[in-house]
Image (cartoon, rainbow, N blue to C red):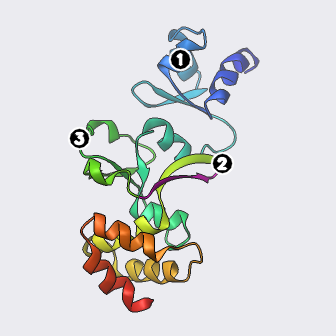
Amino acid sequence: MKKYEKFKDVFNKYNGVITTAEFQASGYHHKHLKELMDKGVITKIKRGYYEWQYDEYISDVTIITKLFPDAVIYLLSALYIYGYIDRTPNEWHIAVARGSSRQRFEIGYPKVKPYYIHEKYMNIGKTKDIYEGQEINIFDRDRTICDVVRNANKIDKELVNQAIKSYINDPQKSTSALLKYAKKMRAENKVRNMVGMWL
């Protein structure tokens, strides 16, 4: 493995996940990627993306942010990160612009569920946070609850109730921001009906 240390250093710069272009920009030929794959040192995530096989675990979120830098952590995944629900989602919910190619999300692992959002809603409540040591795009707590209410008929009712109760008890919430987002997203009445009863 010592002969591969120089390649490992390159992967380390990119948190263990690299594109062919980044590998070549570091001064190495793409043929080395095939050699590394043949030796089981790296695995191919999808076309043009490779992951170093460390002894330690590379988090799903590191891979997701690398593959989909334009995506925003959404719905159940955002709820889980904020600690609003205790049930781990079996796939990563991410919001992407409506015109995004569907083919790019066809990856074996980690499993992702893209939601195609109208572009005018993509920046409402969008923020950055650190999760498992990785900077991520995520909708803030207030926008996330707004999304939960808007999608309540597609989510387990128990999770919806748990999320709303957790939000109400969260000292970091901003109900004024929640209502502002709801108005922009044409969900003000629904939010007032579902969340207002707990306030």
Q: Is residue 65 above or below residue 18?
A: below
Q: Is residue 186 above or below residue 5?
A: below
The location of residue 137, given as percent across then percent down, is 49, 49
The location of residue 120, given as percent across then percent down, is 28, 51
* 47 magenta-colored: no
Instruction: Compare marks 1 and 3 and give the one earlier in the sequence.
Output: 1
Q: Residue at x 29, y 64 (%)?
A: 184
Q: Is residue 78 above or below residue 32?
A: below
Q: How would you classify the magenta stretch by its main secondary structure?
A: strand
Quadrant location of the C terminus? Answer: bottom left
| Viewer can see residue 11 | yes
Select label 1 or label 3 by which is in front.
3
> Which residues lie in the magenta part?
125-133
Instruction: Compare marks 2 and 3 and give the one earlier in the sequence.
Output: 3
Select label 1 or label 2 by which is in front.
2
Nearest the viewer among 77 and 138 is 138
Asked whether the beta carbons under mark 2 and mark 3 sit within 8 Å of each other, the answer is no
Check disc 1 and report the residue beneath it: 33
Check disc 3 and report the residue beneath it: 99
